[in-house]
Every structure is written in structure tokens, then in C-alpha cells.
Amino acid sequence: MIPIAPAGLSRRARRFVEADGIRVPREDIRRHRDVWIERGIPATEIDRAAAFQDRWGGLALPPAPAYEGGPRILDADCPQGSAAQGWSFPAGDCRVSMAYGFMIGPDGAFGIDADRWTPLHADADGWVESLALAAHAGRWARTVTKITGPAVESLDLAGYEPVPEVRGVTDTWWRGRDSLIAVYRGEAVGLDAPRCLEAHVYGGLDEWGLQGG
């Protein structure tokens, strides 16, 4: 089924969701509400997961350039955690076997639950915006350069501005005069593995390539 993009996304992300996404049947997780409450899960956390499911549940998008493609399908499940550490819930199953899972954290951030909780974007909207920007930049760039490991820290971002719509936390996007740079720090931080640092530099972009709506 062709999805309808949720309100609040950029035009670029709306086009991406509706042109490249597929909506599959999604589970109504509200039917588990009574059982989950009996297990001690707060009703407010169940409502939070249900709201995510209403907005994003069942949406399959093209693979991300990092994190082995990201969730196969955005899909909420049973919240986990405690009052002391906060509550999170799964954001969708991995495409391949991974050392972490994708989660929505206590503050609504989209991230990975690796050796430690690592928020990538302030919310799931930011994750989808980053996917849309990567697809757009990859289509229009004349060159794409991948940088890994400590060399990422040597990138000169002077003259670049952060791309606000991706709502970057650990991961960020930067817009320059004729290029876009995506910096993926999540695995390096979450797994304490600097070798996993990664950046993609999309060069030779015109104004449309830099913005895309």
C-alpha cells in the first residue's frame, strides 16, 4: 500500500515516504494494553508506543547508508525499562543480525540500544528526514566520498551549517556551499568503537541538490 506521509515532515521527506515507502499491515498494540499493565508497564508508556505505531507503524523505507540499513519496518512493541532508568520501546526489527536494536528512548529520541543507549536523532521524524536527505543527496551528487575511523574527526566543517530537520543528536548532517556531509557516530559511541566512525561527503551539488525541497 502506498503510504501517506505524516504531517510535519519537510517536502523532501514527504516525497521520499510517499514515492519510496511501502505501508504494510501494522499490529494494533493497544490490544496488549491490559496484559502489559499487569506486567507493571505504565499506561503512559503504552500510550507513547501506540502513538508511535499510529504515526509510523508498518512503514517500510529503503535502507539507510549506515547501521546496516536501519529498521526493516518501523514498528513499535512492548515498552521496557523502569521508573529509575526510564522507559523505551522497540522501533522496528533490524534487517540483519546486529549487536544492538533500534529503540525510541525515554525522551522520544530515535537511537540504538548497544553497549549503552545512544540517541541518533531527537525523534523518529529526524531519522526519516535523514533517510530522505541521504537518498536525495546520493541521487544528485557528482561525487560521494566515504570516510571512516579517526579520519572523520579531521573533517573541516568550517563554513558548514547543521541541517536542522534531521534533528541530529549523535548523528548530524551539515550543509556547505556545494556539498552535504553526513556524520554517523552512533556505533562509535554506543559500542565504544572509534573505528566505527563514518562520514559520507556528497560533493558537486547545486542549489536543488543542497536543499531538495
Image: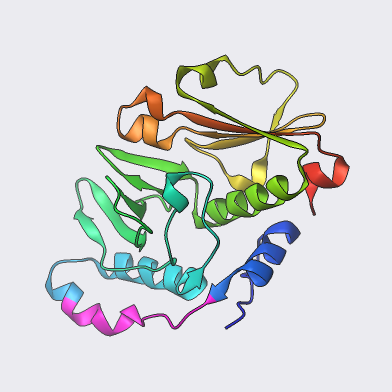
**Residue 66 vertical placement versus 79 (above, below):** above
**Residue 96 vertical placement versus 46 (above, below):** above
Residue drawn 36% across and 68% down?
Answer: 76
Residue drawn 13% across and 75% down?
Answer: 38
Residue drawn 67% across and 63% down?
Answer: 16
Instruction: Residue 198 in the image: state x and y as whole percent.
Output: 50, 31
Nearer-the-camera pick, 92 or 6: 92
Q: How many marks?
A: 0
**Residue 67 vertical placement versus 39 (above, below):** above
Q: Residue furthest left?
A: 39
- Residue 83 visible in rendering: yes
The reply, left or right, for residue 2 in relation to residue 194 is right
Queried whether the magenta region covers residue 25, the answer comes back as yes
Q: Quadrant of the C terminus?
A: bottom right
The reply, left or right, for residue 190 in relation to residue 138 is left
Queried whether the magenta region covers residue 109, the answer comes back as no
The reply, left or right, for residue 178 in relation to residue 34 is right
- Residue 109 visible in rendering: no
The reply, left or right, for residue 49 in relation to residue 140 is left
Q: Which residues are magenta?
A: 23-35
Way the structure is coloured: rainbow
Instruction: Residue 75 in the image: state x and y as whole percent.
Output: 39, 68
Q: Quadrant of the N terminus?
A: bottom right
Instruction: Residue 204 in the image: state x and y as whole percent.
Output: 81, 34
Q: Residue furthest right?
A: 207
Instruction: Residue 27 in the image: state x and y as whole percent.
Output: 36, 81
Residue drawn 56% across and 31% down?
Answer: 199
Q: Would you identify the image quadrant in which residue 175 lies?
A: top right
